[in-house]
Image (cartoon, helix red, strand yellow):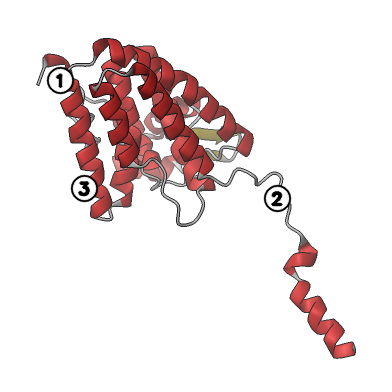
Amino acid sequence: MTELADTLIPRPVRGRRQGTSPGDAIYNHVFNAILEQRLPPGTKLTEDVLGDIFGVSRTTVRKALIRLEHEKIVEIRPNRGAVVASPSVEDAREIFTARKAVETAIVDLVMARIDEGAIEALRQHTAAENAAHRAGDRRRWIRLSGDFHLLLARIGGNRPLHDFLKELVSRTSLIIALYERPGKATCQSDEHKAFIDALTQGDGEQARTLMLRHLDAIEAELHLEGEEDAIDLHRVFAEYFNDTRNSTG
């Protein structure tokens, strides 16, 4: 594997790494928990509790939460504290629009830098996705699915795009937690495999098409009509009215 590819495969943060500051450790753990949907939207992030868990001061916790707020992953509300963000339907649509623009740009960068080592790194990653899926490890599978896109950004070599995509991927995880249709599975690893095949063949146009199709498919599996689907109380209580009519009829 080439020197480039040796640095590509992202590894989850499971403990405080040597040289990592306490604030960075809290940020990484909360970020990963959100990405893996262990912290669903609306979860309260109490400074005292997090301070006890990580053995740090409230000031250190607050700095990490402010960093997450800056990335729109956490909301800090005056006199109410921090909660995991709850993206609206409009937010969801805007985020997918942004992802399509960013990730097609990343595909172009990847096509200019792709090599056998990077292809092997991507194939190893999809193999890990498949293994997590077969094992029924949904949390790991969700994280690896998002990491696949970040791995592509790292191959592309543009740090600002990578950092922007990292924020978009985490916000997408929140959106999926809120709006995923029951029984649906987003971000299929088979689609990742087809994308890698296009990269291997040097077909940039096909790779862009597959990436857009992939993101469209993820968005299509979400229930984003909530703002339009007002609850019809007559319909909800139709059984009651039918029973009343029958009893008086």
Q: Which amino acid does label 1 sit on?
A: Glu
Horizontally, residue 232 falls left or right of residue 11, namely right
Asked if the residues shown at circle 2 and circle 3 are in contact, with their CB atoms under 8 angstroms apart, the answer is no
Mark 2 or 1, which is nearer the eye? 1
Q: Position of residue 172 (x, y in %)?
A: 46, 35
Q: Which residue lies furthest to the left in this view?
A: 1
The quarter of the displayed image where residue 130 is located: top left
Q: Where is residue 199 in the image (x, y as percent from the top left)?
A: 27, 22
Q: Position of residue 194 (x, y in %)?
A: 30, 33
The quadrant of the rendering that contains the C terminus is bottom right
The quarter holding residue 13 reads top left
SS assignment at label 2:
loop
Which residue does the image show at 38% across and 48% down from the upper left? 38
Mark 2 to mark 3 CA distance (whole Å): 38 Å
Label annotation for residue 229: 2
Number of the label disc, if any, that sits on residue 189: none
For numbered disc 1, what is the local secondary structure?
A: helix
Residue 43 appears anywhere in the view? no
Residue 207 in the image: above or below residue 218: above
When asked about the image quadrant of residue 237, the answer is: bottom right
Labels in figure, total:
3
Nearest the viewer among 138 and 116 is 116
Residue bearing mark 3: 131
Q: Residue at x 17, y 15 (%)?
A: 4
Instruction: Using the numbered discs, state the Cα–Cα distance from disc 3 to disc 1 in whole angstroms.
Output: 22 Å
Amino acid at dot 2: Asp
Instruction: Please tell me whether mark 3 sits on a helix, a strand or a loop.
Output: helix
Q: Give the residue type that dot 3 points to.
A: Ala
Q: For mark 1, what is the residue?
A: 116
Label 1, residues with CA under 10 Å away: few <14, some 14-19, many ≥20: few
* Residue 91 visible in this rendered orientation of the protein: yes
